[in-house]
Amino acid sequence: AGEEMRMEELFASMDSAVVEIRGGETTHVVIGEPEPSAVRVLGRVENAGAPHAGVPVRFMPEGGASFDRWVFALTDAEGNYELELPAPGVYDVGVKLFPNRPADQSQITFHREIPAVDRYRLDLALPDAAIAGRVDGPDGAPAELVRVTLIGEPEPDTPVAFVELFTDADGRFEFPSLRAGRYTVAAGGSPLTANGGPTFARTSRSGIELQEGERLDDLHFRLDPPSSVLLEVIDAAGAPVAGATVFARDASGAVVDVISPHATGADGRYEYPGLSAEDYTFFARTWESASAESAPVTAERGGTAPVRLTLQPATRLRVQLLAGAGEPLAGGVVVTDADGHEAAGYVLADIMRILDAGAFSRTSPLFGPLAPGTYRVERFGADGSTASLTVALDGEPEVEVVLRPGF
């Protein structure tokens, strides 16, 4: 019986083709899917009608394929680029906004389909809306090297914007090349990188409406001195957990640092810096575990008594988006917990691993790890279609759900 099973498995794994053989002729047979042909892509990147010179252009296959499948080029003085993609298909095309500013996380993303041809021209024009302003310190003086973050609210056919930069010597900042939409801008907190900037209380402005081509120049922040909260992360046995990433959520329900650089030390403790003297809740994550959210805690100058977070097995939630006929469908997805808070939060140290897992796919995004509980999953599309469901998670390594509008 064992031998028969092995033979069945062998035949099941084979590819086959039916052909007609004619006398005196040579018949060519292709078994399996043919290898996709490479595509030479070239084009020009423009910013306000001028060449966008000296910036990287990055092509990432749909689904957040592994880093070794990304393809890069650099625009020349005329904004031109050229590269070879290994195969046709749907790509996220990223263009860096600022040349020669490696500390800034400044990139705009386009979602484009590359056809199966030998050469394909793809010109890219950056949008021309902008948000600019100034950051002052507690004394009212311009604050240099302060972290300023822009996050776009999810849109059906637009990759979510996440741009981070630092103020100049006059405390000024500018987010150029934005699409129309709703944005949140936050200033202050501790730097994501070893930039050496100051730490102030992080403050945000949400619900900023931006029209196509509109420019907002008067966004002003006056930051307070920073407060902090001491956190302690343990496992189910009560042992301290080193390297757990911690997140703070403000009273509005927004996560303070969506991409968090904050992690516990060898003793399982971490003093979360750069907070306002207000109420926050906290949660912790590793690659495979997560804590429930804490009760509200008021941040204080000089820290607080330890807030304990207990890790437990957590679940990565994969959401498959399908059209009515069952084909993959791109769209925006939001996952919220039982309190209606978005289940956002990414670990800075794991960002490449997250990309490799396909977390940012537009047809099958991955969320989590999520602590045990009930979550609402909602999808919305450019055509106005929506679909939603509720899922209960209980520490499974991964759960997959399917959203199909009208079903």
Image (cartoon, rainbow, N blue to C red):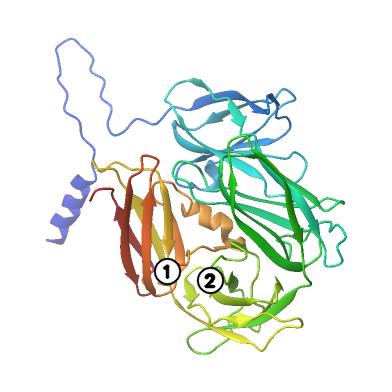
Compared across the picture, whether 239 is left or right of 144 comes to: left
Compared across the picture, whether 88 is left or right of 353 comes to: left
Residue 198, image x, y percentages: 81, 64
Secondary element under disc 1, as helix, strand or loop, is loop
Residue picked out by circle 2: 286
For the residues bearing labels 2 and 1, Cβ distance under 8 angstroms: no
Q: Residues within 10 Å of mark 2 (few under 14, many from 20)?
A: many
**Which numbered dot is residue 152?**
none
> What is the tally of numbered marks visible in this picture?
2
- Name the front one of labels 2 and 1: 1
* Residue type pointed to by label 1: Asp
Q: Is residue 331 visible?
A: yes
**Which numbered dot is residue 337?**
1
* Residue at 49%, 74% in the rendered image: 290
The disc, 2 or 1, on the residue closer to the chain's N-terminal end is 2
Q: Nearer the viewer, residue 15 or 297?
A: 297
